[in-house]
Image: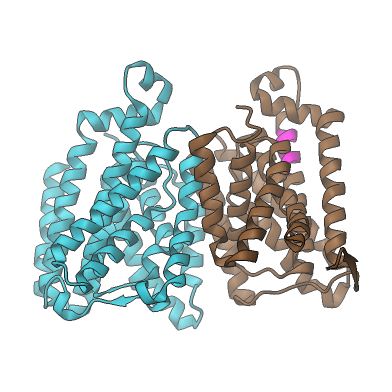
Amino acid sequence: MRALAIILALIPLLIPLVAPKSILFTIGLLFLFVVYVVTWDLVAGYVGEVNLGHVVFVGIGAYTSVLLTLNGLNMWLSILVGGMLSTLFGLAIGSVCLRLRGYYLALVTAILPLVFIQIVNIYPNVFGGYEGLSVGINNALHRTVEGRFYISYLFTLASLIVIYKIVNSKFGLRLKAIRDDPDLAESLGIDVFKHKVLAFVISAFFSGIAGGITAFYRLSVGVDLFGISLMLLIIISAILGGLGTYYGAIIGAVIVYVLKYMVLTSFAQSLGMAGVDDLILYALLIVLIYKLPKGIFGTFYKS
Amino acid sequence: MLPVLIIGAIWGGILTLVASGFTLTFGVGRIFNFAHGTFFAISAYVSYILYPHLGYLSVVVGILSSAILGLMLYFMVKPIRENEIMVILLTLSLALLIEQVILLTFGEDPVSIPPIFKGSLNFFGVEVTSTKLLSFIVAIILIVLLEFTISRTRIGKEISAVSQDYESAMIVGINVERVFMLTMLISSILAGIGGVLYAQIYSVNPESILEILIVAFAIVVLGGLGSVKGSIVSAFLISYIQTAVSYFSDARWSELASLLVIIAVLIVRPKGLFGVE
């Protein structure tokens, strides 16, 4: 499995040689989407807590880094600050909601995207309102699409390796123990609350950085990064691939992203009804919950 | 100040109808229903479409459609009830699916139902339309009825038994599945009535589905998850907070207000005002 994964991980390096620029651009965004999904799955699949506001981490990272860069700070430094701010926000939310068992994290995080979208719209002078903010080519990750593609690839690869190490470490094992039986884990001396918060904060950090990189990759930041539609896309990917299976999240992200941006969006446009694509995806999620609750990876690969 | 008190009480009545059902399904079946807001919106939209053909009978059909949706949801949740994550994701995606269908069919503009009673009354210098008064009276009657059903009747005792200990309830011979189904039905009907009352006073749009859900969250967390009494008291509290926020500043902050209430409760008193757990 591991050798296969390494070979597959190297293939994207060849894509710029064959693919046209527009496709290359989309694939670079797909890589970043993989990071969103894997970091969401770190909390949902390994800790068993549902974060319905994962997009808020992405959005905080993106908006913070763009605003700082537009005010003269170095781009890489602003991306890092954006990631840190996401982490702090994750720490605050996590330490309030994860202290209690039950539905509190899902409940609180479900509200967050709507609150952030409102804030962006209430202060259009600062956040650019519905249209969002443009980054400008001078502030891009790299002037060429190929350059940005490689940066996105390297960042994604690095994040995936770190998350892989985390889920396969003793820490990762303890997370799974908490997910399967929190009482038993507690009685074995695992500090359930601390472990949950730490996993949540790691997830927030990587998705915050990914958000910043996304903004400087596509040269804009907008409310879509806080959107429920993106949130659901992340959830569908993780469920399709298989919760808590690591490779599943990656496979699911690739399939769902391609389905959404290369198939369904053009299908909806040909019908002349924007929104049909989301409708199909929501229906797909409902079908998956009944027919394939363990996901592709969980069903077909037994470790 | 007086308008805030009066409007807050009316809005509080409608919120109680929505929140008490939400907390009931959670308390009894441990079902955290993210699709609860669809009960509220579907009845309003169904009455809106049928009103030109059926007149006020359309309101009854609207409430009936909420009940049917409630039953449907009961059967959809049944096979996956043990898996908390999947229940959350199923009900959420169902809510978004219905929101999207409404959006594609009716567009994003708000719709409303013509009020049953015209005219208005004067309370200490504040004009209150008859519809608002009606909705307040209906809400109070239903709340009293719900409290009575739960505390005095046999089925109410069965509901309490299942919410306290579902396995023991099964052992003493209570048909647990019937109780689950019944609570989902009560919950959907109450929210459906809330929806048709609200659409006569104000208007609903596709976003109402999530907006009302978030208010319901704040109410049940403040009142204590699963406590019907708590949800009644905190529905009025939240209603006054919301009415005051939109009266003195901007209605756009109301979601933030709900969020802050929830976070404050979780920090200070996680089990809520009337929490049992």
Residue A292 placement (x, y as % from top left): 44, 46
Residue A92 placement (x, y as % from top left): 37, 44
- Whether residue A48 is in magenta: the answer is no
Give the total number of marks visible in the rendering: 0
Residue A69 placement (x, y as % from top left): 20, 70
Quarter of the image for the N terminus of chain A: give it.
top left
- Camera sees residue B241: yes
Q: Is residue B241 left or right of residue A301?
A: right
Q: Quadrant of residue A187?
A: top left
Please say which color scheme the image uses. by chain
Q: Is residue A74 left or right of residue A171?
A: left
Residue A281 lies, with reference to residue A220, above or below; the image says above
Residue displayed at 10% across by 57% down = A10
Residue B269 placement (x, y as % from top left): 54, 34
Q: Quadrant of residue B177?
A: top right
Quarter of the image for the C terminus of chain A: give it.
top left
Residue displayed at 43% across by 44% down = A50
Q: Quadrant of residue B185?
A: top right
- Camera sees residue B188: no
Frontmost residue, A19 versus B12: B12
Label the brown chain with its letter. B
Residue displayed at 55% across by 47% down = B261
Stretch of the chain drawn in magenta: B177-184
Looking at the magenta stretch, what is its main secondary structure? helix
- Whether residue B181 is in magenta: the answer is yes
Residue A67 lies, with reference to residue A155, above or below; the image says below
Frontmost residue, B94 versus A69: A69
**Colour chosen for chain A:** cyan
Q: Is residue B92 left or right of residue A29?
A: right
